[in-house]
């Protein structure tokens, strides 16, 4: 243990010396020394110190030849510190400022890549993911021959998977809400979401399941509909079922689909019977009313006039 003491002391002296040197740089007004030291710290991987020194020197060297490399390293320092949103902003500013630079292509890609790395999982808000897609698409359009083209398209594919999973989870959430006290509007929301999902993600692995759920929900919606809407919505069950069977002729859900069709048809026949009886009763009541009016004794004109005057 005694032999370790000189070594620990040496480390302490080196650390103290290093801190003292950096403290002096923070107080320095020699911008050339600051610039060189910032680059040195950057190349050594000490990005937090490099950022502090770049913050001091960049306003001074703005517009000079040295500013381009400093701005680029400054953006990368934030990236290496995993400050992705800040890095994206600085890479974008670099591209806007130095769009003719040999580093411009890399800066625009790193802007997109930083946003991509900051994009959240599918179960969180996806606004930043959409920002990342827009940035990646901009890079692809500006540099279609870039060596990073395939990497950029792979990033978009990954983000699209997140959007798809987010949309699927939202659709399933509406389905869960149909178990609540007031399910009517949620049935309608389910039907709309399931259809929109299939349009937005035609090749999704979830489409078969949601196609079956569409038939299932449409039956529940029809069963709980008001009288005037019931027939139309029960007919929708067969329509959605036919679409499902054409698209998935070998589906594991076919047996369940047939059961739903039979149930909807049974209810439809019962509803149509009630509707016919109601319409017949309504027509009979109308005829009875007309007959009663025809058979009503005619009031003499003089008496009618007297009644009106009174």
Image (spheres, helix red, strand yellow):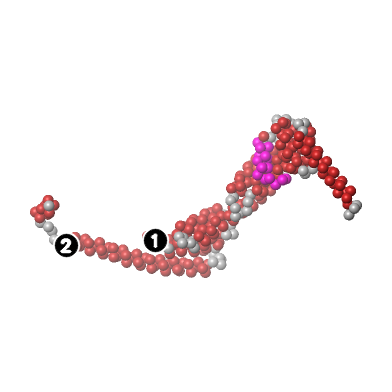
Q: Position of residue 213 (x, y in %)?
A: 52, 62
> Start and end of the magenta stretch?
80-96
Residue 144 vertical placement versus 252 (above, below) = above
In this rendering, position of residue 274 left or right of residue 50: left
Asked which quadrant contains residue 223, the reply is: bottom left
Residue at x-position 90% and y-position 53%:
2
**166 magenta-colored:** no
In this rendering, position of residue 190 left or right of residue 157: left
In this rendering, position of residue 158 left or right of residue 302: right
In the image shown, does 56 or 65 lie closer to the viewer? 56
Local SS, label 2: helix
Chief secondary structure of the magenta span? helix
Q: Position of residue 307 (x, y in %)?
A: 12, 54
Mark yes or no: residue 62 visible.
yes
Check disc 1 and report the residue beneath it.
226
Q: Position of residue 206 (x, y in %)?
A: 57, 59
Residue at x-position 26% and y-position 64%:
284
């Amino acid at each position: 243990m005694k032999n370790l003491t000189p070594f620990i002391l040496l480390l302490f002296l080196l650390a103290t010396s290093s801190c003292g040197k950096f403290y002096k740089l923070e107080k320095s007004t020699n911008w050339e020394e600051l610039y060189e030291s910032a680059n040195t710290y950057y190349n050594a991987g000490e990005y937090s110190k490099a950022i502090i020194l770049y913050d001091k020197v960049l306003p001074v060297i703005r517009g000079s030849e040295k500013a381009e490399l400093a701005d680029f390293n400054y953006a990368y320092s934030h990236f290496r510190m995993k400050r992705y949103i800040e890095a994206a902003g600085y890479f974008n500013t670099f591209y806007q400022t130095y769009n003719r630079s040999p580093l411009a292509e890399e800066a625009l890609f790193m802007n997109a890549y930083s946003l991509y790395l900051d994009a959240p999982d599918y179960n969180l808000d996806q606004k930043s993911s959409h920002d990342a897609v827009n940035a990646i698409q901009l890079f692809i359009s500006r540099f279609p021959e870039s060596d990073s083209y395939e990497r950029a398209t792979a990033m978009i594919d990954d983000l699209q998977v997140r959007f798809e999973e987010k949309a699927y989870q939202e659709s399933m959430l509406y389905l869960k809400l149909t178990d609540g006290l007031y399910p009517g509007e949620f049935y309608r929301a389910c039907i709309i979401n399931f259809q929109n999902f299939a349009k937005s993600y035609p090749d999704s692995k979830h489409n078969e399941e949601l196609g079956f759920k569409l038939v299932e929900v449409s039956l529940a919606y029809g069963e709980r509909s008001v009288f005037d809407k019931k027939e139309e919505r029960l007919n929708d069950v067969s329509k959605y079922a036919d679409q499902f069977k054409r698209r998935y002729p070998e589906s594991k859900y076919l047996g369940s689909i047939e059961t739903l069709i039979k149930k909807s048809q049974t209810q439809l026949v019962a509803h149509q019977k009630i509707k016919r009886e109601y319409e017949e009763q309504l027509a009979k009541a109308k005829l009875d009313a007309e007959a009663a009016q025809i058979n009503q004794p005619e009031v003499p004109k003089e008496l009618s006039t007297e009644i009106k005057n009174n």
